[in-house]
Image: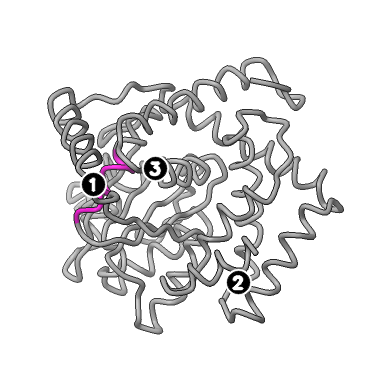
Amino acid sequence: MGESGGVSENFLKYFMKFVEGTRKLKSVLVDRDEEIDTIACAFLTGTNVLLIGEPGTGKSLVVNEFAKLVGMGPENGYFHYLLTKYTEPSEILGPIDIKSLREGKYEVITKNKLPEASLVFLDEVFNANSAILNSLLTLINEKKLILGNMYKNMDDLICVYGASNHVPQDPLLLAFFDRFPIRLLVKHVEPSVENYKKLLQKEISIEVSDKVDTILTRKESIKFAKEFNRLVTTRIEELIDNDFLKSIFNSVKYLKSGAEIFISDRNLKHIVKMIVAYSMLRSEKTSAVPNKTDIIFILTKIWNNEEQKDEIERFLVR
């Protein structure tokens, strides 16, 4: 695997398992390498990702299979829900405990609901009503949930994935949209007889076996993600005066001023962390030094609307 980058042997073992697991997942899902790499880096850096694409492009499939890979399921730390404007907070957070309420205590039954999750996937996230969105803003910003008159710290929540068929147009949703620093455009597989053949074979295989090999338990995955995140933070501190960071800053400066792409100050940290994490996964080395390939991979995912993606790519590859 290459240099260790000063990390423990046990961490390296987890790292190699993670690399091998994502490689295997790419062999199972057709034409989804970019999506897998992106959600994997997000998991390792605690970054929220928004998947944008037409119905039937497999947004849910990719995230669901990744959750299995890291040892999580509907009853073991993974919360997946399709939101509508009629979705009630109790569907997400859990119902009120009637027995406790009769005793004068306000408690929520959170079993298998979002408050107990380590990995969250919210489908059609912008369809949610204001009550849901307000709860989610606190969750995403501070990893806290308001349950009645109590705050619940979600220390084991790693990241939130959202999905939508389109970028929201309502100005009231833009603040929530900004909480997903990475925006991934998910397209249908490239049309060809060979790709359709592979797609059918893989879909049938998943349906029949319903199994993706788990590389780590939920507990191990949480520990590994937190340790990886700390490693990335340390690496950024080491690179603070490096030309690599200056290159990122110059690119972000141009995209904000020249291309008029809105990039909030709070998201700069997430962007840099994702670039560092991708360099490690791509090279399969924890000591990797990021380069232009890594910058392009991440910065092409910070657009505000789909049309800007091509403009970003033209600027970065010139």
Q: Which residue is mark 2?
A: 264
Q: Residues within 10 Å of mark 1 (few under 14, many from 20)?
A: few
Task: Report the residue that reaches farthest toward the right.
Answer: 241
Task: Report the residue that reaches farthest toward the bottom.
Answer: 171
Marks 2 and 1 close (CB-CB < 8 Å): no
Residue displayed at 56% across by 76% down: 261
Q: Nearer the viewer, residue 58 or 316?
A: 316
Q: Quadrant of residue 39?
A: top left
Residue 284 in the image: above or below residue 170: above
Query: Which numbered circle lies on residue 179?
Result: none
Residue 56 in the image: above or below residue 30: below
Q: Is residue 224 left or right of residue 23?
A: right
Q: Residues within 10 Å of mark 2 (few under 14, many from 20)?
A: few
Kindly state the secondary structure of the residue where label 3 is placed.
Answer: strand
Q: Which image quarter holds the N terminus? A: top right
As shown in the figure, which amino acid type bears the numbered disc 3?
A: Leu
Q: Is residue 215 left or right of residue 100?
A: right
Q: Which residues are magenta?
A: 56-64
As shown in the figure, which amino acid type bears the numbered disc 2?
A: Ser
Give whichever of discs 1 and 3 has the lower sequence position: 3
Q: Position of residue 98 (x, y in %)?
A: 17, 51
Q: Position of residue 309 (x, y in %)?
A: 48, 67
Q: Of tags 3 and 2, which is closer to the observer?
A: 2
Q: Which residue is mark 1?
A: 192
Q: Which residue is mark 3?
A: 119
Kindly state the secondary structure of the residue where label 2 is placed.
Answer: loop
